Amino acid sequence: MYNLQNRFILFVLFTAIIIGSHLPAAAQPLHGNRSFTLQDTLRGTITPERAWWDVAFYNIYVAPDFNKKAIRGWNQIGFTIKQYGANKKMQIDLQQPMKLDSVLYGNKQLNYSRNGNVYYISFPDELVEAGKLQPGETASTKTFSIKLFYSGTPREAVMPPWDGGWIWKRDAKGRPWMSVACQGLGASVWYPCKDHQSDEPDNGALIQIKIPDSLVAVSNGKLYSKDDQLDGTMLYTWQVKNPINNYNIVPYIGKYVHFSDTYTGETGKELTLDYWVLDYDQEKARKQFDRDVPRMLKAFEYWFGPYPFYEDGYKLVEAPHLGMEHQSATAYGNQFKDGYLGNDLSGSGWGLKWDYIIVHESGHEWFANNITTNDIADMWVHEGFTMYSEPLFIEYFYGKKAADEYVQGIRFNISNDIPVIGPYGVNQEGSGDMYNKGANMLHTIRQVINNDTIFRNILRGLNKDFYHQTVDSKTVEAYISKHAGIDLSKIFDQYLRTVKIPELQYKISKNELAVRWANVVPGFDMPVKLENNGIWLHPTTEWKTIPLPASVKNQTLKPDLNFYVITRKVTS
């Protein structure tokens, strides 16, 4: 067990690295107040120019110039029309200093205008008329497409993945090593798209990457083709068959080598496991990946259900940054160490028995990639569940006591600065507490449910019933309450929408015990179990008196440590 000084050092490390790794767009600070601009609203809201159409697929082509730190390419966007005649303008997002060069609808050039990081594409009357449904057609079957040509010098990531953008680095041998990290900042930092989490390309994506033939390009999904351009360059095409978040689509370009394996999942399907690492890291990668990937999949399929993207495979790609949950192509940069860069963020010791990035970032395949929030304000659904996947992994292999100690350890990292849920409609997440507090909230709810079979079925049910869907926090909260058979709404409100830790107040007099909840939202009535003796209390916000349990006489009242609450003895 770590001492207090070591735990404080780990807390500082966690705050600086883990929480900082998800700074919102434009490197805005997570903490403190900020004013929002029109650009924030255009980015975070389903505007009328976004509402009338739905993304069907992306076909992205990019050719980077390492020496100039510039890129050029195009994105062919397939879309269906949800609201005919509602609007003649389409909002396309592309962040400055990137620029659109031209837009084609078939062979016709379309006009467009710019407002900051947003372009408005104008559709002439005859094209709007041509897009109307004919007898027998439905909006879901009639697909249109536009092709957007773009170029420029994309924002460079200063300290990826925390301060995101395009990454231009050299490996240990001085060779070009490129990628992108853009969660929060947004995919529009490097390619034109509908940059809102609520609209994923339903039919997947093609990612085409043209690079010098001395390098290798890797992306999401499976390798579709590799074509020699006969000019010293190679065109790699990767295909994603499933819906995918915009920010998850990324290129990895470097001196990669490949090795692979397969995994037979709980349904009997065979999942391809592909690993792409720099040539000089292959031996270390084989040892780390071969050990932790199969057991991660075994634990997570048990808790969450089948891996959600069998058609696209599972892939780890060595990245020029720490890591990110890029769907079917997880970015890995943990230096082939156990723990988080060799550290245990819980201070319990259990975090040093597995590779943090492999487990955490892979957990996002279920929560963030399979189930995605419509608004980044609800990002706790991604990070809280995925942080909780860590103790679930520990529990599967090392037992429940070990998992409990890990959860209680990461509780030390909670700051309770601002609410976990952020403001809606402006592309702004809430507190970095979405990780540790989100996990501790889920652990507390698990205690309240008091039935691990039901709890596991809820986790699996979420991934089954919201398979490849985007959701809101309220939908997830209601689902858990319904399937638990308990109204958990006040618990969610308490931990997600306030910074207050529930305080269990108590008074002991003669043979009576009086308890109540304080520092809570109105109507908070969470039951709580006492430590060791298994006695359950059912406090409300009003004093409630019960016969003093024998085990509590002349002692301090101690709730089970698996509840994220505090206690205070009231003497008056």
Image (spheres, helix red, strand yellow):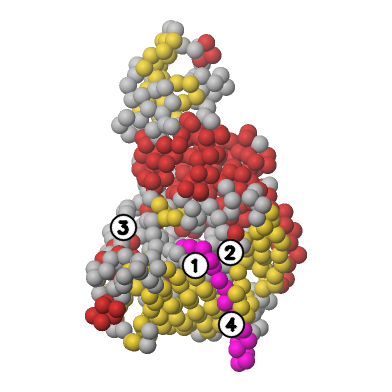
Residue range corresponding to the magenta coloring: 227-245
Q: Nearer the viewer, residue 552 or 555?
A: 552
Whether 236 is among the magenta residues is: yes
Local SS, label 3: loop
Q: Residue at x 51, y 48 (%)?
A: 464
The label on residue 235 is 4
Instruction: Report if the CB atoms under discs 4 and 1 are less than 8 Å apart.
Output: no
Instruction: Report if the CB atoms under discs 2 and 4 are less than 8 Å apart.
Output: no
Disc on the earlier residue, 4 or 1 = 1
Give the vertical position of 500 relative to 94 (above or below). Answer: above
Disc 2 vs disc 4: which is toward the camera?
2
Residue on which disc 1 sits: 204
Residue on which disc 2 sits: 312
Taking the image as drawn, is residue 62 in sight? yes
Tell me how far mark 3 sits from mark 4, CA to CA: 38 Å
Disc on the earlier residue, 3 or 4 = 4
x, y percentage for residue 391? 59, 42
Q: Nearer the viewer, residue 412 or 339?
A: 339
Disc on the earlier residue, 2 or 4 = 4
Q: Residue at x 28, y 66 (%)?
A: 83
Disc 3 vs disc 4: which is toward the camera?
4
